Image (cartoon, coloured by chain):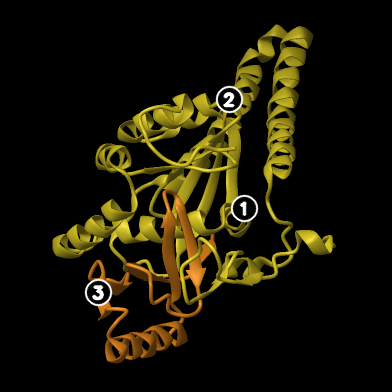
Chain colours: A orange, B yellow
Amino acid sequence: MARLIRMDRTGHSTVAEWRADDPAAVEAAVQAFRRELDRGYLAMVTTGPGQAEQVRELPVGADTVILRRPISGG
Amino acid sequence: MLTAPDERCDAEVVMAAGGGPPGGLRTAVLPETATVYWRPRVDAARLRRIGRLWTLTTVGHVVPFLLAGAVLIWLEPLSAPVALICLAHAWVIPELYASRGANVVRPGRRSDESSERAALGLLGDLVGHAERDLHARTGLVLERGRLGTWLVGEAGALLVRSRGRRVDCWCVHVDDQQLPSADRIAHLLLALRADEQGFATVANLAFSGARGRIRRRLRREMRPALDTAANGDGTSGPTPP
């Protein structure tokens, strides 16, 4: 089961869960993903040890997608 | 300052293919760099230049006070108290800069226990066993990069480079200070992993100098993390090319 996780003040929250072979769950996850991006979150996927990528569409085949807030200096 | 087009921080978007996550558009450059578009992108050569500038600045602060003290005593030995004040300035000013650098990884406010525990679980999933252990002991997460070895804190990061001799102190934070401390680190860690040079471009450099100067000013429990980063042992992670 893949998960869309948002880092928030509770530690983290699971926003959506889906299986690639469940179109309804995938569609719900895509909608949730877009809502979070509209709220200003950035979506990250770990692609290997010490490597991550930002994604702008839900990668359905990923195990975990993490939503983070923007960072800034200072 | 004008910047060459290839150094600008414009977001480069590439289609996911091959080893990337399937089904998603991915950005190769940290989007936050767009907020500091005027800054040249940080790379190893730029870091070396900045490091030399910091060293020159430190010499510029110290030498005039030392000379003034020496000249005062040479002209009039009775002016020794004033010469001592000059020497104190020569010592204090670099120490204040180093202190500012060490403060970038000072721990911040803690959230409630359940939030901190949940955030710690997620951070633990992102790093290896050795890094988890180091974080539990020191509060810093070690991450090897191409520019050097990073120690990521809640509101800043230390970059240990030049074979452990030099440390750059970066002030950078997530724009939500109500997050649990481990989440604040996870935010920085993910951004760092996505685009190391972009991360350094977004961050503000608070200090660059010898490791010993920073180590003295770090909290005692954080010093082993700096030693580990400088010695390059005890942790897993990607090997720099």
Residue shown at 43% from the left, 77% from the top: A41
The answer as to whether the residues below labels 1 and 2 share one chain is yes
- Please, what is the three-letter code of the amino acid marked with disc 2? Trp
Q: Residues within 10 Å of mark 2 (few under 14, many from 20)?
A: some
B94 on left or right of B67: left
Considering the numbered disc 2 on the image, is that residue within a helix, a strand or a loop? helix
Residue A56 % position (x, y): 51, 78
Residue shown at 53% from the left, 64% from the top: A72
The answer as to whether the residues below labels 2 and 3 share one chain is no
Give the foreground label among 2 and 3: 3
Residues marked 3 and 1 touching at CB (< 8 Å):
no
Q: Chain of mark 3?
A: A
Q: Label 1 belongs to which residue?
A: B197
A47 on left or right of B127: right
Residue B233 % position (x, y): 40, 27
Quadrant in the picture for the C terminus of chain B: top right
